[in-house]
């Protein structure tokens, strides 16, 4: 969920599992923030293959970076 960087009024908003992008943008605006950047971040799962730890990508999540208005 949202992570806040109090130094410069920035906050990170992650689109929830059962939330649309529009719903997330509405949530951002209701909290008094304005989105400035959209990023897609991979989700990894750690697996052991042939005795080695391997990070396997299993999905992605959408994150918005926002600033206080």
Image: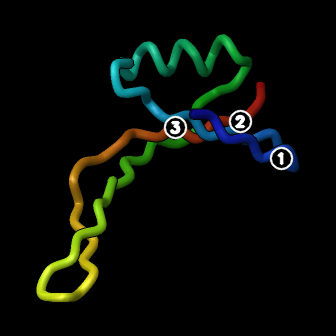
Image quarter hosting the N terminus: top right
Q: Is residue 7 left or right of residue 44?
A: right
Identify which residue is drawn at 30% across, 67% down. Answer: 46
Q: Give the structural element (helix, strand or loop) at label 3.
A: strand
State the separation of the CA atoms marked 1 and 2: 8 Å
On the image, numbered disc 1 is attached to which residue?
A: 8
Identify which residue is drawn at 33% across, 53% down. Answer: 43
Among all residues in the image, which is located at the extreme left?
Answer: 50
Q: In this rendering, is residue 43 above or below 27?
A: below
Q: Quadrant of residue 31?
A: top right
Q: Viewer-proximal residue, 16 or 40?
A: 16
Image quarter hosting the C terminus: top right
Identify which residue is drawn at 81% across, 39% down. Answer: 9
Q: Which dot marks residue 67?
A: 2
Chain-order first, disc 1 or disc 3: 1
- Give coordinates of residue 59: x percent, y percent: 24, 48
Whether label 1 touches label 2, CB < 8 Å: yes
Q: Which dot marks residue 64?
A: 3
């Amino acid at each position: 969920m949202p992570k806040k960087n109090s130094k410069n009024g920035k906050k990170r908003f992650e689109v929830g599992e059962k939330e649309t992008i529009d719903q997330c943008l509405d949530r951002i605006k209701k909290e008094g923030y304005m989105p400035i950047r959209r990023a897609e971040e991979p989700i990894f799962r750690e697996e052991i293959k042939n005795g080695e730890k391997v990070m396997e990508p299993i999905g992605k999540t959408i994150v918005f970076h926002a600033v206080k208005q």
